[in-house]
Image (tube, rainbow, N blue to C red):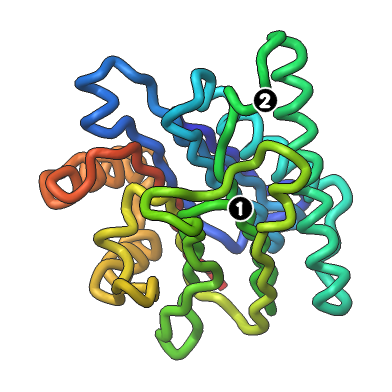
Amino acid sequence: MTQQQAASKGGTSIWRGVGASLCGTSHVSGGIPCQDAHYWQVNDGDVLVAAVADGAGSAELAEVGAEIASRAVVEAFCASGKTSGDDKGIQKSLGDALKAAQKAVQTEASARKVEVRQLATTLILVVATPDMVAAAQIGDGIAVVQDGDANIIGVTTPDSGEHVNETTFLNARRDLKHAQFKVWHGTATHLAIMSDGLQRLALTMPAGTPHNPFFLPLFKFVSNTPEPAQAQQQLEQFMASPRITDNSTDDLTLVLFGRLS
């Protein structure tokens, strides 16, 4: 499942982006659909709003929850989110967007007459402007930035819960209490958001910090990416390569952005 909205609204975009969500080998062999999703918009040419969602493997309608949550959280932030002012105000806007996404998932569950846990999903929301990157996250996965000095910084960290292979999902209202929020001040030259299927390769464990040799070639790729269709194809080929699939059988989502100016 792949969702994208790369068009800029209200100006020429300063962001070049490419992203893909691919079905993991375990899902392919089991006849299970891809339960990851991603979505993004660029507003006023320089405000990037992007999301990655990873549906719970135990949820019967995980792919539906991931698709709805990733789109709803971006659209909610774009409609009323705050990108200036103090950090608390920005974090409140992020939290309000998470609540809107949760409500959208709950509404879908009601319409289908199923319990909301059947649409359980993790969710990462990232908002980037020319001078800051803000993020909210429920569950695992990670958002990473590169600054002008080529430092690679984890804006969020994976939430793996209290036990092995456990994480938090966007289900009940109480789950929002586990959300992490971060406002990083600086100019990001590159940005990556990914689901947990890539964590083993992308992070240095147990600290959960970004593994620079993984990200540097990807950031170079997005900075020199060819036209969108070719870039999409090349990213999907990389994600389906043995280097990746030999280390992860889970669904995979990777979204990359490079700053043009």
Task: Locate residue 101, reporting x and y percent.
Answer: 73, 39
Side of 253 relative to 44 (left or right): left
Mark 2–mark 1 distance (CA, rounded to whole Å):
16 Å
Side of 143 relative to 32 (left or right): right
Q: Residue at x 45, y 51 (%)?
A: 255
Side of 40 relative to 207 (left or right): right
Residue 83's image quarter?
bottom right
Q: Is residue 1 above or below residue 174?
A: above
Residue 2 seen in this snapshot? yes
Task: Locate residue 122, reporting x and y percent.
Answer: 55, 44
Q: Residue at x 49, y 40 (%)?
A: 54
Side of 255 relative to 10 (left or right): left
The one nearer the camera, 127 or 28, is 28
- In the rendered structure, which amino acid carries the disc numbered 1? Ile
Q: Residue at x 80, y 77 (%)?
A: 87
Quickly name the residue at label 1.
138
Circle on res. 227: none
Task: Locate residue 183, reporting x and y percent.
Answer: 69, 75
**Element type at mark 2:** helix
Residue 130 seen in this snapshot? no
> Crowding at label 2, few (<14), some or many (≥20) Cα neighbours within 10 Å?
many
The one nearer the camera, 137 or 183, is 137
> Crowding at label 1, few (<14), some or many (≥20) Cα neighbours within 10 Å?
many
Of circles 2 and 1, the one toward us is 2
Instruction: Report the label total.
Output: 2
Quickly name the residue at label 2.
116
User: Quadrant where the C terminus lies?
Assistant: bottom right
